[in-house]
Image: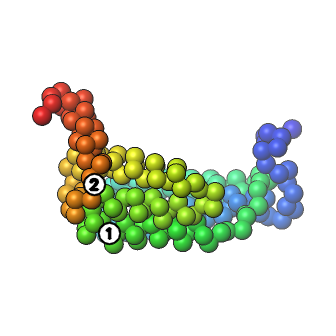
Amino acid sequence: MTLQAPGDRAQDSNPGIVKSPLDVGGGLFLIGVAILGFMGAFSLPFGHLSGIGSGLLPKSVAVLVATFGVLLLAQGLVFGGDRLDRWGIRGIVFVLGSVLVFAFTIRQLGLVAAGPLTFLVASLADRETRPVEVVIFAIIGTLACGLLFKELLGLPIPFDPLSLAGPLHAPYEAAKATLKALFLGRVH
């Protein structure tokens, strides 16, 4: 009797030591991320029972990620599974490119321009993306980011230093007033 549901995973199609290359690759990736995270937090104090140090959370998360990586690696060595597919470079280039676009435009142009540009560049990662959906998602996402980061969290993010918002200013102010009324119980 097998523990796998029919059709979920290939039935031991690989006779070698690696039964699921996808799981082994994922496990190795998680272990690598955990090692980098632990190395980055290595010099931070872990703390004692009387007080938590700044290194407690990153080191604990790194250990948990490594644990899941080891479990996934073991699963890939014991149970049959999927093979690794070919990687497309398009997604990686445009998603990382969108992060760079955001980093280079947020200070000069503000969130009003950097947000939609970031969504636009990231949407190029998928060939099936429709322009109308991208525009709608970019506007809603930019407004949501402005409300969350600028208004609710109070971060010093330039929202519209060049006064580009125009028609977005009224809905943004209305949403801001609604959120203040909901969370603070008063309207300004």
Residue 110, percent across and down?
Answer: 27, 62
User: Real-space Cα distance between discs 1 and 2?
Assistant: 15 Å
Write the residue at 45% across / 58% down.
119
Residue 120, percent across and down?
Answer: 47, 61
Residue identifier under label 2: 165
Write the residue at 72% across / 68% down.
86
Which circle's residue, 1 or 2, is located before the other in the chain?
A: 1
The residue tagged with tag 1: helix, strand or loop?
A: helix
- Identified by mark 2, the residue type is Ala
Viewport quadrant of the N terminus: top right
Viewport quadrant of the C terminus: top left
Residue 82, percent across and down?
Answer: 76, 56
Q: Is residue 61 above or below residue 84?
A: above
170 and 172: which one is in front?
170
- Label 2: few (<14), some or many (≥20) within 10 Å? some
Residue lying at the far top of the rendered structure: 185
- Identified by mark 1, the residue type is Thr
Apparent side of residue 176 relative to residue 29 in the rendered image (left or right): left
Judge depth for marks 1 and 2 and give the one in front: 2
Which quadrant holds residue 85? bottom right
Write the residue at 85% across / 54% down.
12
The residue tagged with tag 2: helix, strand or loop?
A: loop
Residue identifier under label 1: 105
Q: Residue 58, can we see it? A: yes
45 and 174: which one is in front?
174
